[in-house]
Amino acid sequence: MAPIATLISLSIHCLLAAAQWETLGGVFTSPPAAVSWSDGRLDVFGRGGNSAIYHRYWNGSQWTPSNWESLGGLLESPPVAVSWATDRIDIFAVGTDRALRHQALTGGTAWSGWVSLGGVLQSPPAAVSWGPDRLDVFGVGTDSSLQHIAWNGTSWSGWQSLGGVLVSTPTVVSWGINRLDIFAVGTDSAIWHMAWDGSSWSGWQSLGGTLRAQPAAVSWGPNRLDVFSTGMDTALWHTAWNGSSWSGWTSLGDAFESLPAAVSWGSNRIDVYGVGIDSSLRHIAWNGTVWTAWESLGSVLVSTPAAVSWGPSHVDVFALSTDYAVWHLEAEG
């Protein structure tokens, strides 16, 4: 009879194979980040045991390089990645000194090296771009307020406090030029929201709810926002903005061990992923009319998933498994 450890290992890899997962290797200490800057292009980042950031990319036919490349650094937080143009990626993470670090890929080939943007953050960063050469980055400061810095195409703005008393990492999304919407959990376990309309900040607004985790937010069109978080019951909860009002919170059921990840590849389409209590990847989708039933996409995962879409009906999901390697699933939206 095979040893118990061997049987467990075989069972895990059978589950991974059943859902057509592939390993990208590596050994990481935090959830991966993923971004796409064009059809068929995927870039994935992770933080290694030496606190450096590592990178691999899919060029349309294969993963490159054959092993993860080190981008260096000495980081305490998971990385976040954003792209505002073809051949351009900006990555951010918090350093061991709590300052924000930034590195950029320009021209599709050359990395800039790490630069400190200062600040003192106690949360991982959140980053977004609403147009070419524009970047907005947020994090929670040591006083639990939201901190913000922006790139205008020429220079960084310097840090600005947007107030609030937050207990989760913020989430930011943009549905149009000069528009930003930010969400985070407050001390009352409600989701709080703040928006930039191109000229001023709205101030904080409570969206209610009793949530236990950093929200995920997505927009599939102008004036549309969908926000997800896990409740105290571990179920997935959802609220939406239709351009004039918020819908109120609705339970979508199931039971999550991880934060949710949400992505949209087209108008009126949303895909949401999370790690279930059985450690498998769980998936639910809005098809424009109704929410689908929950489905298990297999695997045995130990991190929050990252989901990215580079085209209609195409979603790629990345997460760490029990070997702490990055595993990848090409999901059909």
Image (cartoon, rainbow, N blue to C red):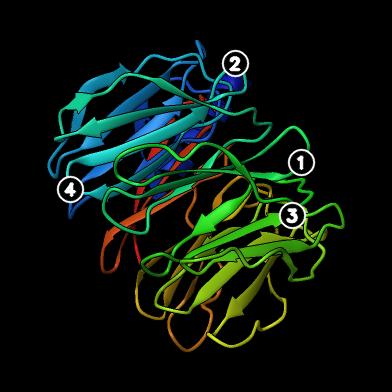
Q: Residue furthest right?
A: 188
- Direction from residue 153 to residue 255 in the image, left or right: right
- Direction from residue 146 to residue 60 in the image, left or right: left
Seen from the viewer's position, the closer of residues 124 and 228 is 124
Upstream in the sequence, badge 3 or badge 4? 4
Seen from the viewer's position, the closer of residues 304 and 82 is 82
Residue 183 appears in the rendering: yes
Q: Amino acid at mark 4?
A: Thr
Marker disc for residue 96: 2
Secondary structure at badge 3 equals strand
The alpha-carbon separation of the residues under discs 4 and 1 comes to 35 Å
Secondary structure at badge 2 equals loop
Across and down, in percent, residue 128 comes to 43, 51
**For the residue carrying disc 4, how many other residues have a C-alpha within 10 Å: few (<14), some (14-19), or many (20+)?**
some
Secondary structure at badge 1 equals loop
**For the residue carrying disc 3, how many other residues have a C-alpha within 10 Å: few (<14), some (14-19), or many (20+)?**
many
Can you say which quadrant of the picture contains the C terminus? bottom left
User: Residue 313 falls in which quadrant of the image?
Assistant: bottom left
Q: On the image, numbered disc 3 is attached to which residue? A: 185
Q: On the image, numbered disc 4 is attached to which residue? A: 86
- Direction from residue 102 to residue 148 in the image, left or right: right
Q: Residue at x 61, y 16 (%)?
A: 97
The alpha-carbon separation of the residues under discs 3 and 4 comes to 33 Å
